[in-house]
Amino acid sequence: MKAFYTAKSYSGETKSGEMDVKNERDLANQLRSDGFVLTSFKEFKDEENEIEIKFLDRFFGISLKDKLMFARNLSVMISSGLPLSRALKNISVQTKNKRFKKILEAVFKEIQSGSTFADCLARYPAVFNELFVNMIRVGETGGNLEEVLNILALQLEKEHDLTSKVRGAMVYPAVIIVAMIGIAILMLTYILPKITGVFKDMNVDLPASTKFVIAISDALQNHGLLVGICFAGLIVFLKFFLTTQSGKKAIAFFSMHIPLISNIVIKVNSARFARIYSSLLKSGVSVVESLKIISRTLTNYYYTEAIKSGIEDIQKGINLSQIIAKHPKIFPVLVYQMTEVGEETGKTEEVLLKLAEFYEGEIEQITKNMSSIIEPVLMIIIGSAVGFFAVSMLQPMYSLMDNIK
């Protein structure tokens, strides 16, 4: 059976985690051999393979901001002395997101029927990921739910800030690209047909580039609805594909091999790894369980695989810093060095928290300068597109003038 436990050493150190054991006595004996005394024990089903994310949940999730406010408000209410069920009821009444409201109302009812808070949240994996659920489980079992919720709220806040900065940096290029596509569609639909009509009347031999532009124009004019449906279908397919293992691997490969993007991806994932790991250790989760949770929380394929492969090494007694050193392409040298310092001093959670703050500062600086870096790239792309269109239209005009002469 799988059990979630908390234990204390004779020196007062607390740890918690999951373990496959025969019974409670077997768990207590294993912990005693490691110098720990079992303080709490809970048997639960491993729902990792039983609960799947529904198809529609892949497209309509709950925003990070909503989950952040949920954790923060719940922490404040519990610290004020409100019972968990009443706090959940109050938050569900205040929640404006209708879907999130229904989920919280369902969680409230399940808690009243005797289920644990963590088990209730685990039934909604598209909303509450494994990090969220396991930290809540630690807080429930250890009796420090308020403290864990504070840590979780801070974690979500930093993640929200990080995501907002990266998305904010991409707004400018996204607006330019969308505007460029819109102008191109207008030209191909309304302006180009008037020009190409002259070419057809004069029987001019058109170059391949011009034929290509005219073919796109004809498709938009004659089959605009079909093109729109195909484009929407492509977006839906890509959205679904990127949630699959193959899609994650593909996006990770491209993001790690584009010069400017790869630098941001490495720093974002290093910051997330350091902060999540620090938060889990601070909450009392064991090293092995923390790495398992991180491997299922980080979205980048290469980081996930690197951490998964390192879990077995950790169980053999190899330090985390040595595992990180095996992956220099995704973990900068600083991550290895700081982790090693934390292990040597016994202050891993404090050192990694500072490392996370350092990388978050780096990301903030990069995103501030993003527009000035991307602007010349956009100018090249726009210039190339305009140049291609101009050449495609001018070539047959020159041919037309030669025929007239």
Image: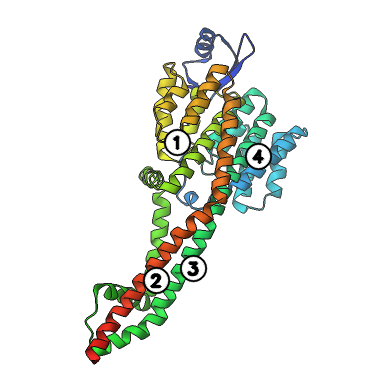
| Residue 76 numbered tag | none
Residue 1 percent location from the top left of the image = 47, 21
> Mark 2–mark 3 contact, CB under 8 Å?
no
> Mark 1–mark 4 contact, CB under 8 Å?
no
Which badge, 3 or 4, comes first in the chain's sequence? 4
| Residue 50 numbered tag | 1
User: Dot 4: what SS?
Assistant: helix
Q: Quadrant of the C terminus?
A: bottom left
Mark 1 neighbour density, 10 Å: few (under 14) some (14–19) many (20 or more) = few
Q: Is residue 394 left or right of residue 146?
A: left
Residue 137 percent location from the top left of the image = 59, 29
Q: Which residue is mark 4?
A: 71
* Amino acid type of the residue tagged 4 in the rendering: Ala
- Can the viewer see residue 4? no
Q: Is residue 248 above or below residue 141?
A: below
Q: Which residue is mark 2?
A: 386
Task: Name the front one of labels 2 and 1.
Answer: 2
Which badge, 3 or 1, comes first in the chain's sequence? 1
Q: Which residue is mark 3?
A: 179
* Amino acid type of the residue tagged 3 in the rendering: Ala
Which badge, 2 or 3, comes first in the chain's sequence? 3
User: Dot 3: what SS?
Assistant: helix
Residue at mark 2 to residue at mark 3: CA–CA distance: 13 Å
Residue at mark 1 to residue at mark 4: CA–CA distance: 26 Å
* Amino acid type of the residue tagged 2 in the rendering: Val
| Residue in the image at 41% along x and 51% along y | 240
Which badge, 2 or 1, comes first in the chain's sequence? 1
> Mark 3–mark 4 contact, CB under 8 Å?
no
